[in-house]
Image (tube, coloured by chain):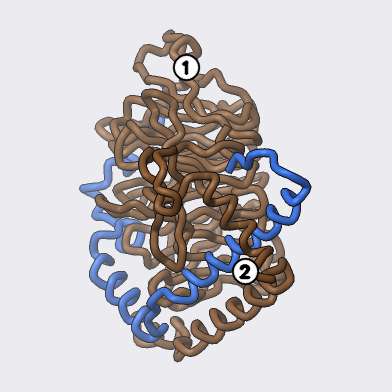
Amino acid sequence: MCDQTFVAITFGPCDSCSQNKPLMNIYLQNEPVNYCSLCVELMACQGLAKGETVSTLRAESENLKAKLEEERAKLHDVELHQVAEKVETLGQFVIKTRRTLKGHGNKVLCMDWCRDKRRMVSSSQVIMRSAAVCVLQEHAVTMPCTWVMACAYAPSGCVIACGGLDNKCSVYPLSLDKNENLAAKKKSVAMHTNYLSACSFTNSDMQLLTSSGDGTCALWDVESGQLLQSFHGHSADVLSLDLAPSETGNTFVSGGCDKKANVWDMRSGQNIQSFETHESDINSCRLYDLRADREVAIYSKESIIFGASSVDFSLSGRLLFAGYNDYNINVWDVLKGTRVAILFGHENRVSTVRVSPDGTAFCSGSWDNTLDFNPV
Amino acid sequence: MALTRMSSKKQSSNNIAQARRIVQQLRIEANIERIKVSKASADLMHYCGEHAKYDPLLMGIPASENPFKDKKPCIIL
């Protein structure tokens, strides 16, 4: 269970006591060090001797937070939409829903595109979209896991991962044989102590990243089911995650009910950056720039009184698609901060919005039991 | 982390350990390098501009290249 034990990735001489023991990778004064668990405990207790108390530490953390705000504010010299005034305004955004995919017996909670751009997986069906023929083929392969809140396609397209209220993330190899019993080939990979909220393969089929209602994220080896790294720092359920889109990338971001978006280093488990939203913010989408380390745009309107459940960018990053609990999808101009279109079409909450890997279409899933497939 | 059972000091050492972790984390965050919003915005605009022509949802694609253009009514297989 990933939030109750730690996996020792290294074994060797402790930097503090020099004994050969399983080591924990921690950071002291920004330097990575390896301490055995006993030394970590001792260090924690030393604080008591020095007169360090919880209240002095709290005071220090308040000071640091204030300093952080100050540093961030110094660099806030302009607003993104002001700089974007000189960018050409977008033409009218027109899209017609080409195909509504019914057939789910229940709410669509999540979906993912296959990298081959021809297939999608949604809870709980695999849908085959054939681009060679001018029709949409629906291969409904029912995935035998119940209460699926998260699903993902592996980069190879040969495997899917899913999980939810069973607290696990399991992988299933795919076959085109509709009669194939997928349940027989199920392999449990991730185990959390609360529901699985999101999952994603990293750049290969071999590693799976998960987030959970237990407040943690975790990186797993698919083959062995071993926990490779766990990510602690959220103080409430983690609802979503996304990997940085780089070939060599090893960072990802997670969003939680503690109103924080945390950026993590996958190798060390370290929380690199953290963004917090304010109390008053329930119904807006926000853009945070990692290098400026702050929010740079807010996408909201007074008329929008329901929250957004899912967002995705178009390929160039100019458009932001957001699915809302008022059953609509709003399309935003990322740079100017204006809304360019409202898309109707669902009869219940939009739970997931994903742009296809080639950017030619986006798909939205809803609690009305359908998926809307919108090609250009 | 699995903390071994120690004395009654465990409770306060837990809080201390947690408070220290928070302070540690904030120190790291306070020390990262940041750029100005004006520079970040300029870079964002540049990126969007450069990639706009490769964005079908932004530009549309010619009907001849669109595999989903309705040539005949959609049929369910």
Residue A161's x, y, as percent? 45, 29
**Disc 1 and disc 2: Cα gap in Å?**
39 Å
Q: Chain of mark 2?
A: A
Amino acid tagged 2 = Thr
Supply the letter of whichever chain is blue.
B
Disc 2, SS: loop
Q: Closer to the camera, B3 or A235?
A: B3
Identify the image quadrant of residue A63.
bottom right
Residue B15: where, in percent of width, then height?
70, 57
Q: Which chain, by letter, is brown?
A: A
Disc 1 sits on a residue from what chain? A
**Residue underneath mark 1:** A186
Is residue A260 among the parts visible in the rendering?
A: yes
- Look at mark 2 in the image and give the residue it sits on: A277
Label 1 and label 2 in one chain: yes
Q: Where residue A373 appears, x then y in whole percent?
A: 45, 42
Q: Residues within 10 Å of mark 1 (few under 14, many from 20)?
A: some
Residue in view at x 57 percent, y 45 percent? A216
The reply, left or right, for residue A376 in relation to residue A146 is left
**At 50% from the left edge and 33% from the top edge, which residue is drawn?**
A122
Q: Measuring from the top left, give residue A359's x and y in whole percent.
A: 33, 52
Q: Residue furthest left?
A: B64
